[in-house]
Structure formats: C-alpha cells, structure tokens
Image (tube, rainbow, N blue to C red):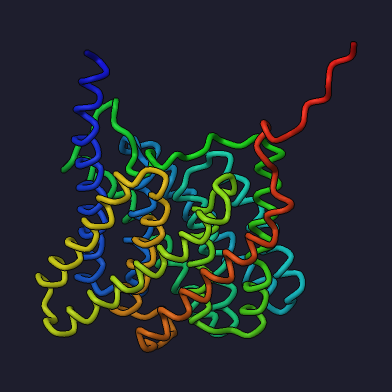
Amino acid sequence: MSTDLTSEREPTRARRAALRLAFGVTACFALVEAVGWDATFLAPLLTAQVLTKLRQPPSLSQGLALVLLIGLSTGFVLAITKSLLSHPAALILTLALLLYLSFYAHLRGAPNLVTLLLQISVVSLPVLAVASPDAAVEFAGVLVSAGFVAVLTAWVAFAVFPGDATDTAPQASAGASNVPSPPQAAREALLNTLVLMPVLTGFVLVASELAVVVLIVIVNLLRQHNPLQGRHAALGLILGNLIGGLAAAVVYNLILLNDTFPFFVMVCLAATLAFAGRIATAGQRAPIYVIALATFILLLGLGMTPLPGGSGEAFVTRLVNVLWASAYAVGAVSVLEFWRIRPTHDVPVEPSAR
C-alpha cells in the first residue's frame, strides 16, 4: 500500500517541482527586466541552478550565509584580478588554482550557488578587466546582486509552491551520482580545470566580452557532465545547448514582434514550463534539459541586455559560439576520458591466496 501511495505522489511532486522552477525563473527574469539590470541572464541563471538542486528552501541563516559567501568570493576574485592584471602568468596560474578548488568543492557537495558564482567570477572578471577594469567592477556588483536575488527568488518560489519532507529536487531523478571520494573528486576537478584553462588563457590574453558567454557555457557543461555515463551522455549535452539556443531564438524573435512586458512574461513562462517539466520527468536525460534551460536563459538574457561594456551581437553569432563551446568541451572531455577514474567494479580483483 505504501508503495502505491508513493507512486501516486510522484507525478504530484514532479509537477510541483516543475512549477516551482518555471515560476522562479520567470519571476526573476521579470524582476531584472523591470528594473533594467545589466547582464539580465545572471539572476535567472543562478535561480535555475538553485531550484534544480534544492528539495527544501534554505533557512534564513543559510540564505544569509550564502549571500555572504557570494560577496566574499566575488570580491576575492576581483581583488586578485586587479592586483595581478599586470602579471598575466601569475594571474593565469592563480585562476587555475581557484577553478580546481571550486570544482573539487562542487564535487564534494559544497553549496551549488556559491561554487557556480565563484567559477563565473573566475572566468568572467579577468576577461572583462583586461578589456575594461570598470566593466569588471560593474560585473562583480551585478554578480553579487544576482546571487542575492536568486536566494530571495528561491524563498518566494517555495512559498508559492511549497514542498514537503518527501519532495525531491527537479533534477534528483536524473540519477545523480553519490558524492565522489576525495581522490576521485580531485581527479575530476583537475580534468575539468585542464579542459577550461586553455580557453580561459586565450581569452585573458586576447580580451573579448563574447568570451564570457563561451566560458560560462563550458563551465555549465562541465558541471553537468557525469563521467560514469560515457560519451553518449556528453554528446547529449551538445543537443541540450542546441535545443536551448533554438528556443531562445524563437522566443527572442516573438518578443521583437510584440515588445510588451506582459507578452515577455507570458512567453518566458511557457518556455521555462516546457524545460522544467522535462527536467522533473526525464530521468537520466535530465542534464540535457538543465543545459538547455541554462542556454535558453543565457542567450535570451544577452539578447535583452548585453554584458556591461559589451554590445549586442547577432543572435546567430551567439548561438554558433554556444555550439562551438559545447563541441570543444565535449571533445576535450572525450580526449581526457582515458584518465578518469572508473567505477570500483571495473577494477580487477586479485585472486585470493590458496
């Protein structure tokens, strides 16, 4: 009987989680558009990352601690960037260390929002600072504000669509692996850093605001990639980026045809509901739709408001760069797959002594 009740409640839980995710992302998009923030994509992107992982809202103390950690980590990266800007080699080595530590912390279960914001800071602030120090400072402020808004939006979303103690996060059904052991997490963090650093180094030496989009896409893909699921799962993440990019192009052009705030909210809610529903029910394929939602938010937000100090490029150009970033990340991950730690059941066991 209890098994039957549990199976009956699963669709309700999935529906509630999907509505919570779609409402949170749309409400956050509406808020930042209404107040005219720069880098519109940041707060909704962070909100999506929080609501796809949380089963229950953070407590007041946890929320305040998250905001404090976000401010400290972003300020720390900005201070390092400004102090080492005239020493590129030292700056790049320091960024590599920060990325390694953040990937390790993420794999070991550190707060998702904090590690993501630290990684976004590491890949964006140095690139922007090389092009314009003022733009880097402005973007750092937007990052901290976006983290604060993401926490507030999560509280509101859980208040509107409350869960219970048996709820799961929207992506919990994706077959998320258990927390890896310290040696395995260290190996994975090193390989993720090796994938990201060549691109980051190139963009730091040749500054471009467009680089921020490419780097954030690679960071999101590496955070979603599960090495135990093989190359087919990695290729699926390219498909996720393509789906998200095409959806963003459609929604962006619809908004251009009817440039009113209520219409923007309506089409944004419809698109996020479609993604959220698939994230909550797609099982092992959920990471594909998580990437698709992130790409949708990133491209639509950039279409609405460019990065500080940047300019709006053609939508096709942004989509091509997103696909290029995905192809690079999947290719690099595939090349490095040989060095990844295999599951323990693949390790041969020595015969016992007679």
Looking at the rendered image, the quarter that the N terminus falls into is: top left
Nearer-the-camera pick, 221 or 90: 221
The quadrant where residue 25 appears: bottom left
Q: Position of residue 45 (x, y in %)?
A: 36, 60
The quadrant where residue 167 appears: top left
Q: Residue at x 20, y 28 (%)?
A: 9
Query: Please, is residue 122 above or below residue 315 in the view?
Result: above
Q: Position of residue 309 (x, y in %)?
A: 44, 84
Nearer-the-camera pick, 56 or 224: 224
Q: Residue at x 71, y 47 (%)?
A: 187
Nearer-the-camera pick, 234 or 128: 234
Query: Please, is residue 305 above or below residue 275 in the view?
Result: below
Residue 45 at least partly seen: yes
Q: Position of residue 261 (x, y in %)?
A: 12, 73
Q: Residue at x 51, y 61 (%)?
A: 235
Q: Position of residue 176 (x, y in %)?
A: 47, 40
Nearer-the-camera pick, 55 or 308: 55
Q: How many marks?
A: 0
The quadrant where residue 162 appears: top left
Query: Please, is residue 169 above or below residue 215 in the view?
Result: above
Looking at the rendered image, the quarter that the C terminus falls into is: top right
Residue 124 at least partly seen: no
